Every structure is written in C-alpha cells, then in structure tokens.
Amino acid sequence: GKIKSVGITHRYRFEERFFADDFQFRFRYMLGLKLKIKHNDQQEATMYINAVNELFINAQGTTFDRNWSYFGVGQRLSKMFDLEIGYQHQFLNGRDRDQINVMLIASY
C-alpha cells in the first residue's frame, strides 16, 4: 500500500525449519516503510529511505528467536533496478549482530 510518498509493506510467514535430527516451526512478521526523498523530472522517485523490522517467533521452545531492524538509503537506477546501502541490527538470544548491506535489487 501507499500513503502519499510512503510505501508500506508487510509480510507474514509460517515456516518449517529442518535440522540434522529435528525440525521446528517459526512465525515471522515483517513491516517495512519506504519514503521517497527525491524525484526526477517525470516525478518518479529516484532516491528513497527504507526502514524494515522483522520479528521471528518460535512455535516450540523459547518463544523469541530474533528480531531484525534495518535502515537504508536507495537509488533507483532504472524501472528494473535499485541500488541500496543500509545498516542491519539483529537482536538474537544472548548475542546481537550488526552488518552493512549493499544490495542490487531487481524488480520484474
């Protein structure tokens, strides 16, 4: 969906994870906001800010699995490609992880 120049994305998944001697079920919910910050002459967004959060909940055992928070800045290269760089923080059970993501995103 869209509210003016803000795109809203949400996704939920129920997944089955297989391990060497076991499997588990996990629920995931993702919410993302994309704000257009620069337009070209045709009023198409060429730059944007992207913020995403995804929560992971286990169906068995410890309920909280992890949470991903992401903030990035992107540039539309063409109708098919975006280039984005951002920072992601993962909240995990007992340990956290930070990373920088550089992505070429293809839409078709």
Image (cartoon, rainbow, N blue to C red):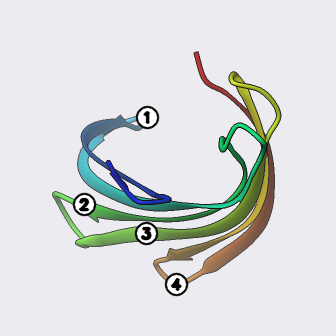
Upstream in sequence: badge 1 or badge 3:
1
Q: Report the Cα–Cα distance between label 2 and label 4.
A: 16 Å
| Label placed on residue 85 | none
Asked if the residue under mark 4 is in contact with the one under mark 2, i.e. CB atoms within 8 Å, the reply is no
Upstream in sequence: badge 4 or badge 1:
1
Q: What residue does disc 2 label?
A: 58
Number of residues whose C-alpha sits closer than 10 Å to that of mark 2, classed few (under 14), some (14–19) or many (20 or more): some
Label 4 SS: loop
Asked if the residue under mark 3 is in contact with the one under mark 1, i.e. CB atoms within 8 Å, the reply is no
Q: Residue drawn 78% across and 45% down?
A: 40
What amino acid type should be assigned to the residue bearing mark 1?
Answer: Ala
Q: Nearer the viewer, mark 2 or mark 1?
A: 2
Q: Residue drawn 77% across and 66% down?
A: 99
Q: Nearer the viewer, mark 1 or mark 3?
A: 3
Q: Nearer the viewer, mark 4 or mark 1?
A: 4
Q: Report the Cα–Cα distance between label 1 and label 3.
A: 21 Å
Upstream in sequence: badge 2 or badge 1:
1
Q: Position of residue 98 (x, y in %)?
A: 73, 73
Upstream in sequence: badge 2 or badge 3:
2
Q: What residue does disc 3 label?
A: 66
User: Quadrant of the rendered structure where residue 21 is?
Assistant: top left
| Label placed on residue 94 | 4
Q: Report the Cα–Cα distance between label 4 and label 1.
A: 23 Å
